[in-house]
Image: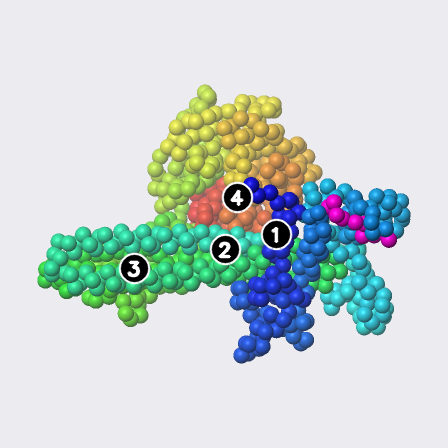
Amino acid sequence: MAERPSAAQEALSKVEDQLSCLVCLEPYTNPRLLSCFHVYCQHCLEDIVAHNRQGQLECPKCRRPTPLPPTGVSGLQAAFNVHHLFDIQETLKKIKEPQKLACEKCSKTTRKATSFCRQCTKFICEKCTDMHKEWEEFEGHEVVTIEKVEGDLIRLVSPNKVTPRCPKHNKSLKLYCEPCGELICIHCTVQIHKDHKYCVIADTFESHMKNILDSLGPVEKQLEATDTALVNLDGRHAEIVEHRGKIATNIHSKFDEIRRALDAREGELMAELEGHTQQQLKSLSAQREEVEILQTQRSSCLHFVRESIRTGSPGDVLKMKQGVVKQVRELVDTFDPNTLEPRETTNTLFVPSAQLVKECKKFGVLYCDIVIPQKAIVGQKVTAYYRFLCPLNSAPPEAKLISKITDKTTNCVVKERGKGEYEISYQPTVSGASELIVSVGGEEVAGSPFPVAVKTPIDKLGTVIKTINDLRKPRSVALNQAGEIIVAELDAGIVSIFSPTGDKLRTLDTRGTAVGEMKKPRGVAVDGDDNILVVDAVNHRLLKFSRGGDLMAAVGSHGNGPGQLNDPYGVCVNSVNGKVYVVDRLAHCVHIFNSDLTFSTKFGSEGSGNGQFKYPWDVASDRSGCVYEVDHGNYRVQVFTPDGGYLRQFGAKRGSGNGELDRPASICVDSDDLVYVGESGNKRVSVFTCEGVFLKSFGSYGSGPGQFDSPYGIAVDQCGVVYVSDCSNNRVQIFS
C-alpha cells in the first residue's frame, strides 16, 4: 500500500499548483497583477499585447481589459503575494525531510536544525535558538520547533518585514505620500514631495488597511448576488427545458386527433417551439457566461486583496493601495444588477385554433409574453414587451393595470413592433400593489395577472388615495402578508380586519376582562406567520390570535414585575429574532417577549437620559433588528439594539420645524429602513432615514383629506403606501 504523503508534501503540492501561469503553464516569471486581480508572467502579458491589433491588454481568463501604464507591462503592479508563495515553496522543500536539515544561520553547517525563525525564514540549531532568545537584535522574532512548523504550515513564512530603501537617497522608506500613493524617505519630503500630505507607515497602516478592506464590502455583496444569480439561471434553464416538454406534450396530444391533416402544421409549430427554446437557452447561456465573469472578477478581487494584506508588508500593501482601491471601485461602479435577472421566461403557451379541420394549415398558435417589469414608479412610463412565436393571424394582446387598493384601472397602450412583437406601455397614477392583466382574444395569457409594485417617490408622498371611515377611535394599524388592513378600535373594544380595498372582512371581538378577552385594544402588530398581536391597555395584557381570529396565547397582568404590564400602548414584532416588543407607558420601559409570549427581559427606566423614557407610546424595528421607540414625553425617537442597548436618538427638541418633534405618538419603519413618525402635537407625519436625517413631513390639523387630529398609528407596505389611523377623526387614511 502506498505511503500517505506528509503534511509538508501535501502543502507543497497545493502551493506549486498556485505558482503556474495559466498562459505558459510554467512557474511564474516576474508575476504581474491585472485590474481584474488575475496574475500572469510579465513575458506572457507582453506577448498578449504584441499580438493584439490595438495593443491592448485583455485578461485571458475573464477578458477584462487592463489599462497599460506608460512603461508598458513592466509598470504593472508586481504580485508580491506570489513571491511569498515561492518563499513558502522553498521552505516546504526543506521541511519534507527534517532529519537532513542543517542550521542555516551559523557557520557550523553540520549542526542539525531544530527550530525555524519565521522572521529570518531560516532553520536554526539549538545554539542559534538560544541566541534568538538572548540577543536584542532578534527581539520580536518568532522561533518555533520544526514539529510546530509542520503543524502550522499556514504561517510557515512571515511576510517580508524588511524596510525598503529609497533608490534616490538610500534612506529607509518609512513614510507614505497620500497624493502620490508612494513610499518615500525623509529627504523626499523636502525635495520631490514638498508640500504633499504624508504620514508614517507604522502609525497609519491599520487605517489604510481598513480602508482597503472596507472597499471590499460592495464586492462581497455583488459576489453573493452573482452566486444567487447563477443558481437562478440554472433553475430557469431547467424550468424552460421542463416547460418545453409540457408544451410539446400538449401540442402532440392535439395533433394526434387529426394527424393526417395537421402533420405539416405540427412540424411548423414544433420547429417554432424548438427554435424559441434554443434561442432562450442560448440567451441564458450567454447571460450565465456574463455572470460567471462578474463572479470570477469579484472572487479574484477578494482573494487577492485579502491574501496581499495577510502576506504583504505595510509598504507592499500601501504601494498597491491606490491602484487596488481604484480597481475595486471600477468593479463596483461597472456592476449592473440587471445582468443578474434571467432574461427569459417560461410563459410560452400552446392555444389550439378554432374550426380545427378548416384551419388545419393554420392550426395552433404559440405565444410568449416577455418579462413584465414588476416594479414601477408613479408618473413614470413603464414598458413591457410581448411577442407571438407564430404570429400568423394572431390577435393583438390587450392589457390593463388595476390597483389592488383603489380598483383604479390604468389603460395600457399596445403598439405593434412587427413580426408578432408588441410593446405594452403604461404610466401608473396610484402607488401600491397592482396587477397587470394581459389577454389575447379575450383569454388571459399564462401568468396573468402579473404583480406590479408601484411606488411613489418619497418627496411626493402625501396624497390620500383611500379612506376607511366609521371607525371607533382607531388606535393602531398593521398589515399582513395578504395586504389586509388590521385596525385596533379602542372605543369599540375590537380589532377589525379590512381587505386592501377597504372592505370589512372580519372582526376579532372578545370584549371582556377574562383571560383571552380584551377591553381597550391599543396596539396591534403581525408576526411572520400572520398571527395578530394585540396589547390591551385596560386589562394590561398581550394577546396572540391566528389570522382567522382564534386565540393562541394571552399573557400579562397589572404590575411592574417580569411579564407584568402597566398601561401598555404599542407593540411590534422583530422580523430578525421573532421577539415581541411591548411599550409600557406608565412603567417607562419596553418589555421583550419571546415568540411564544414567554417573558424574556425589559429595558428602560423613567428619565430623560440615553435609554430612559418619559411615557413611551410606540415601538418598531428595522431590517437589521434595531428597535425604534417613540419617547412621547421627551419629544424624541430612541434607537436600540435588539437586546435593548442604546444606539442613538433623533428629535429631542420640541418644535414644529423640520426634524423637530412635538408629542410623537406612533412609529413605523419601512422595507427601505425609512422611519415614519406620527406627531400628535404637530398633527403630521414626519419621515426620517434610520440615522435620523429628516426627509419630509405631510399633514396638518383638521378633519379634511390629508389632515389629522391624532395620528396614533402608522403602517407602511412594501410599495411605500402609508396607512395612518387618525384616532379622533375615527378613520384610517391611506397615502400615496
- In this orientation, does residue 680 appear? no
> Which sits earlier in the primary sequence, circle 4 or circle 1?
1
Judged by depth in the image, the label closer to the viewer, 4 or 3, is 3
Residue 100 belongs to magenta span: yes
Count neighbours of disc 3 (C-alpha within 10 A) and say few if under 14, some if 14 to 19, many if 20 or more.
Answer: many
The residue at the point 85 percent across, 68 percent down is 170
> Which sits earlier in the primary sequence, circle 2 or circle 1?
1
The x and y percentages for residue 355 are 11, 59
Judged by depth in the image, the label closer to the viewer, 3 or 2, is 2
Mark 4–mark 1 Cα distance, whole angstroms, equals 54 Å
The x and y percentages for residue 423 are 33, 66
Q: Which residue is mark 3?
A: 368
- Viewer-proximal residue among 132 and 360: 132
Read off the magenta span. Answer: 98-107
Judged by depth in the image, the label closer to the viewer, 1 or 3, is 1
SS for dot 2: helix
Mark 2–mark 1 Cα distance, whole angstroms, equals 27 Å
> Which sits earlier in the primary sequence, circle 4 or circle 3?
3
> Is the image coloured rainbow, by chain, by secondary structure, or in one colour?
rainbow
- Amino acid type at circle 1 is Lys
Furthest residue in direction left, as rendered: 358
The x and y percentages for residue 284 are 40, 60
Q: Where 256 falls versus 604 (above or below)?
A: below
- Amino acid type at circle 3 is Cys
> Magenta region's main secondary structure?
loop
Q: Which residue is mark 4?
A: 668
